[in-house]
Image (cartoon, grey):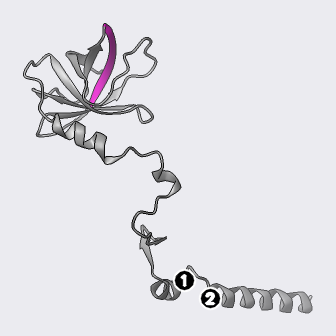
Amino acid sequence: MQRSLLILSASVLLVACEGSKSPWSSSSRASSGVSEVNGQPVEAAAPGVKFSWDKDTPAEAPKAAVAAVVEAPKDPNKARVLEVREAAGLIFLLRSDKPDVKARLQLVKDGKAIEVEVVKVSDKNEVVANIIPNQEKTPKLAAGDEVACGVRASAPQ
């Protein structure tokens, strides 16, 4: 019994000593050029290096094209689509007037309609809207599209 306790305490001491030599410890991070983001080590990448999550991101050209069309439509029954994030279920719109938060908007393009709920409205009449799930035959929206936009109703609270 004493022998097993001795071996157990020796192994704990050995692991503790090895842990202090870890490349992730704070003393070795400062000397290795590793910085921290949210407490996690992040190594600085060389300029022009792309990571696996960067390969599917669009180039800067489409953002410049959308930035050129930053004006809201003059007609209050229209909206301009600035960005669509289907995976997150969000649409970023620009309107001439501000809808209320939780108001439901119906966006119509090519005779097809999609219903969204307003999540946030900025001072510049930029609207972040949540796509209402389980809709059939919805239009395919893209950045730069001008769509008909009508206020349907407020969502129940």
The quarter of the image holding the C terminus is top left
What are the residue bounds of the magenta stretch?
111-118
x and y percent of residue 97 in the render?
Answer: 10, 26
Residue under numbered circle 1: 25
Give the image quarter of residue 120. Answer: top left
Task: Residue 157: tell me if it is visible.
Answer: no
Q: Secondary structure at mark 2?
A: loop
Q: Nearer the viewer, residue 61 or 157?
A: 61
- Crowding at dot 1, Cα within 10 Å, few <14 / some 14-19 / many 20+, comes out as few
Residue drawn where x is 54% and y is 83% of the image: 25
- Count all numbered tags in the image, as a single digit: 2
Q: Residue at x 9, y 18 (%)?
A: 75
Q: Residue at x 17, y 38 (%)?
A: 68
Q: Residue 21: x, y in percent?
A: 62, 88
Q: Which residue is mark 2?
A: 21
Is residue 43 shown above or below 18? Answer: above
Foreground residue among 145 and 8:
145
Q: Main secondary structure of the magenta part?
A: strand
Disc 1, SS: loop
Instruction: Name the residue at the top extreme.
Output: 111
Magenta span has 99?
no
Residue 79 visible, this orientation = yes
Residue located 17% across and 27% down the image: 100
Name the image quarter holding the N terminus. Answer: bottom right
Q: Eyeballing the image, is 14 above or below 79?
A: below
Q: Position of residue 6 (x, y in %)?
A: 84, 92
Separation of marks 2 and 1 at Cα, in angstroms? 7 Å
